[in-house]
Amino acid sequence: DAGITQSPRHKVTETGTPVTLRCHQTENHRYMYWYRQDPGHGLRLIHYSYGVKDTDKGEVSDGYSVSRSKTEDFLLTLESATSSQTSVYFCAISGTVSGNTIYFGEGSWLTVV
Amino acid sequence: QQQVKQSPQSLIVQKGGISIINCAYENTAFDYFPWYQQFPGKGPALLIAIRPDVSEKKEGRFTISFNKSAKQFSLHIMDSQPGDSATYFCAAVNDYKLSFGAGTTVTVRA
């Protein structure tokens, strides 16, 4: 157990509404990530953070924003949800505490209708 | 485009058989190659990992073979068991960022 909690675990929302997913970690890891998983694509990096207030884009960042105001929390926001953002979202963490191994949370299932 | 190419997309193996999954990469900056196992409804869990200065790593029934010159690596699951039925992802790490293969669904028939 890498001490990662994602919330909500399941959400159904309407097109055009804002959505925020939260990732909370308990072990003071420096790096935090948001991935999305879709059939045939594996997991793709949306955004990541390498410290408080330090974030950068991944390969599929369009339509998403992130914030990290404290070490333990990394928020992913869909400003205006679209059906193409229906996916499973995974938070992950890494850092010297984990020996630089990347560990994943249990996932958040998002459906945009 | 996918930085790590994985094959096959799926495979079926009899109990006790060997499952082999192959991956290839182009970016020589990758410096760590983990494999993840994922069960339905769960997050990916680290299974085994290797660094490019090692050609083989074995942990129980799972072995990674790594060919640095060919930029290829593979996972072998020996004596496959029904509990090994899952989706397996290869990955490559550069600068603390993971790039994943598309995944292989392994089904072990009893």
Image (cartoon, helix red, strand yellow):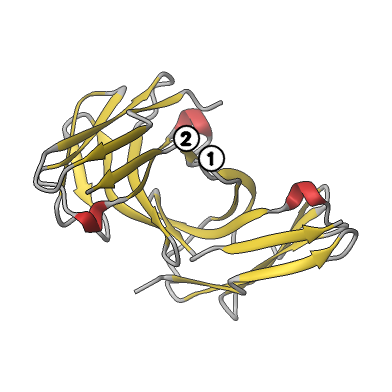
Most extreme residue toward the top is A26
> Residue flagged by tag 2: what amino acid is it?
Glu
The answer for which chain carries disc 2 is A
The picture places residue B99, in percent across and down from the top left corner, at: 42, 60
> Please, what secondary structure does the residue beneath circle 1 have?
loop
Residues at circles 1 and 2 in contact by the CB criterion of under 8 Å: yes
Q: CA distance from mark 1 to mark 2?
A: 5 Å
Against B23, is A75 above or below?
Answer: above
The picture places residue B52, in percent across and down from the top left corner, at: 59, 62
> Please, what secondary structure does the residue beneath circle 2 have?
loop
> Residue flagged by tag 1: what amino acid is it?
Lys
**Side (left or right) of B4 relative to A57:** right
The picture places residue B89, in percent across and down from the top left corner, at: 56, 58
The answer for which chain carries disc 1 is B
Residue assigned mark 1: B42
Task: Tell me if mark 2 has few (under 14), some (14-19) or many (20+) residues whose alpha carbon lies within 10 angstroms of its own.
Answer: many
Against A34, is A63 above or below?
Answer: below
Residue at 37% across / 41% down in the picture?
A109
Asked if both marks, 1 and 2, belong to the same chain, the answer given is no
Task: Tell me if mark 1 has few (under 14), some (14-19) or many (20+) residues whose alpha carbon lies within 10 angstroms of its own.
Answer: some
Residue at 80% across / 51% down in the picture?
B82
- B80 or A29, which lies in front? B80
Residue assigned mark 2: A106
**Residue B53 visible, this orientation:** no
Q: Which of the labelled discs sits on residue B8, or is there none?
A: none
Q: Quadrant of residue A34?
A: top left
